[in-house]
Amino acid sequence: MKTYLFKVTLACAAIGICGVASADTTIDEVFTCQLNEGKTMDDLREVNARWVKFMNANVEGGNISGNIVTTIVGDLTPGRFLFVDSFPSLESWTAAKSATTGNAEGEAIDADFGAVTTCTESELYSSESS
């Protein structure tokens, strides 16, 4: 699931549109998603926690976080949420994109995401602290 739209965001990174991260910069990938019918936020939390644990164990340096963001004011469509995955560098993000390929545990987590949620958009940001 989280590999959805990978080619678009990887192309962005490859041609340098996303820029180079500095020490005070993180790379944040934001997904717009909807829970699949019959699935709950608890189902989502469980698979997301497994994804974060897997990424931190399988990407050199770790320090990857995955947040589930729900609306308080605005579009209150039931089951709609955002994923915000944060990476310490563009290299870390790139490594995370390939970490599940050929890894049975990682591929199972991706399949579980697909069973729980459908994501229709993905954007990659450079986030700078100030």
Image: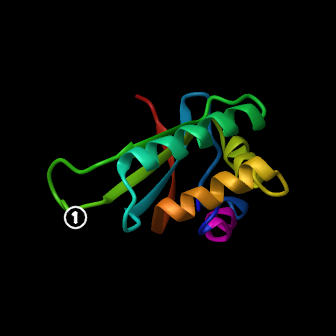
- Where disc 1 sits, the SS reads loop
Name of the residue lying farthest toward the right: 102
**x 53%, y 64%: residue:** 115
> Quadrant of residue 130 in the image?
top left
How many neighbours does mark 1 have within 10 angstroms: few (below 14), some (14-19), or many (20 or more)? few
**Corner quadrant of residue 21:** top right
Residue extent of the magenta highlight: 6-12
Query: Is residue 60 within the magenta segment?
Result: no
Q: Quadrant of residue 86?
A: top right
Report the residue at 61% width, 64% height from top. 9
Q: Nearer the viewer, residue 110 or 56?
A: 110
> Taking 83 as reference, is 27 left or right?
right
Q: Main secondary structure of the magenta part?
A: helix
Q: Which one is nearer the viewer's eye here, 109 or 11?
A: 109
Q: Position of residue 116 (x, y in %)?
A: 48, 60
Above or below, 48 against 120 in this view is above
In percent of width and height, residue 119 lies at 47, 66
Taking the spot 23% from the left edge, 61% from the top edge, the residue there is 78
Q: Amino acid at mark 1?
A: Thr
Q: Is residue 65 left or right of residue 117?
A: right
> Which residue bears the numbered disc 1?
77
Q: Position of residue 64 (x, y in %)?
A: 60, 35
Residue 48 position within the rendered picture, expressed as x and y whole percent measured from the top left = 52, 44
On screen, residue 14 versus residue 47, left or right, reads right
Residue 9 belongs to magenta span:
yes
